[in-house]
Amino acid sequence: MSYAIIRTGGKQFRVETGRYYKIPSLPGEPGGTVEFNEVLLGSDGKTVKTGVPTLTGAKVTGEILRQGRGDKIVVFKMKRRKNYAKKQGHRQGFTEVMINDIKLG
C-alpha cells in the first residue's frame, strides 16, 4: 500500500491512491486535475523515502471533485460589564480531491 505525506494550504495530509480528501480551497473547476509537488515523505509499501524537507522529483496528482464550504462556526466575543458583545459567523472553503497517482521520483 503506497502513501505519501503532502503539504498544501499550510497543513499536512497523509494521502493514498483512490481515496477522497477535503483540503483547503484550491483554484480549479470540478473535473480538473491538481498536482502536489511538496511531498514530505513517501512509501511504496516496502521502503520509506523521506525528504529534506521535500522529496525531489516526487509528485502526487489528483482530480478535483467539487468546491464547497464547510459548516458554519460561530465566533462570539464578550467582555462582561463593558457593554461589549460581538457575534460573527465563518464558513471555511474546501476542495474535495480524489488522489489518482503517487510518484516518488
Image (cartoon, grey):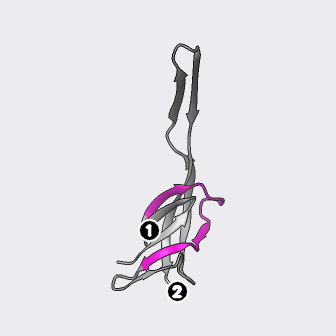
Quarter of the image where one finds residue 92: top right
Mark 2 crowdedness (10 Å alpha carbons): few <14, some 14-19, many ≥20? few
The amino acid pointed to by label 2 is Gly
Q: Secondary structure at mark 1?
A: strand
Relative placement, left or right, of 74 versus 48 is: right
Q: Quadrant of the N terminus?
A: bottom left
Residue 85: x and y, percent? 57, 20
The residue at 49%/40% (across/down) is 71
The residue at 65%/60% (across/down) is 28
Q: Which residues are magenta?
A: 20-42
47 and 93: which is toward the camera? 47
Q: Mark 1 vs mark 2: which is more N-terminal?
A: 1
Relative placement, left or right, of 39 versus 14 is: right
Residue 94: x and y, percent? 55, 52
How many numbered badges does the structure rendering display?
Answer: 2
Q: In the rendered view, would you say 38 is above or below 104?
A: above
Gap in angstroms between the C-alphas marked 1 and 2: 16 Å
- Circle 2 sits on which residue? 105
- Does residue 9 show up magenta in the picture? no
Contact flag, marks 1 and 2 (Cβ < 8 Å): no
The residue at 57%/37% (across/down) is 90
Q: Secondary structure at mark 2?
A: loop
Label drawn at residue 15:
1
The residue at 54%/69% (across/down) is 62
- Does residue 36 show up magenta in the picture? yes
